[in-house]
Image (tube, grey):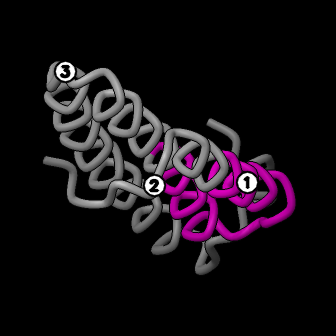
Amino acid sequence: MEILPNISIYHYVIVSILLFGIGVVGVMLRRNALIIFMCIELMLNAVNLLMVGFSNMWGDGKAQVFVFFIMAVAAAEVVIGLAILMMVYRNQETTDINILNKMKW
């Protein structure tokens, strides 16, 4: 028994494309590292939504287990990225990614 019988795979694809597009535009246009991290997460969630949609269409739950592992890895990525960003903010007092080009080792 389907919960939402009127929602087809096309709806999943359209919402996924919109979310992924918003994420790409955010990564390309914004210079704030926090916004870029959020846009990357938005793109990952768009892919996860599409995988769950296709998994529902085919009646197979393997993709949903894979989505769980993708979300766990994405959470670990955000934790490490935010730790690095906090260290950059402590040293440079900004989250602008253009300042990272000026940092020399």
- Determine the residue positioned at 21% across, 59% down: 3
- Residue 98, quarter of picture: bottom right
What residue occupies the far bottom of the structure in this picture?
A: 93
Answer with left or right where residue 38 lies relative to residue 52: right
9 falls in the magenta region: no
Q: CA distance from mark 1 to mark 3?
A: 33 Å
* Mark 1 closeness class: few <14, some 14–19, many ≥20 residues within 10 Å: some
Task: Please tell me whether mark 1 or mark 3 is closer to you in this view.
Answer: 3
- Location of residue 15 with respect to 73 vertically, above or below: below
Q: Kindly identify the amino acid type of the residue bearing the numbered disc 3.
A: Asp
- Location of residue 84 with respect to 63 vertically, above or below: below
Q: Kindly identify the amino acid type of the residue bearing the numbered disc 1.
A: Val
The answer to the question of whether label 1 and label 3 lie on touching residues, with beta carbons closer than 8 A, is: no
- Determine the residue positioned at 73% across, 54% down: 27
The magenta stretch spans which residues? 17-44
Q: For mark 3, what is the residue?
A: 60
Q: For mark 1, what is the residue?
A: 27
Where is residue 92? Give x, y as percent. 61, 71
- Residue 18, quarter of picture: bottom right
Where is residue 77? Give x, y as percent. 33, 43
The answer to the question of whether label 1 and label 2 lie on touching residues, with beta carbons closer than 8 A, is: no
- Determine the residue positioned at 21% across, 50% down: 2
Q: For mark 2, what is the residue?
A: 7
Q: CA distance from mark 3 to mark 2?
A: 17 Å
Q: Earlier in the sequence, mark 1 or mark 2?
A: 2
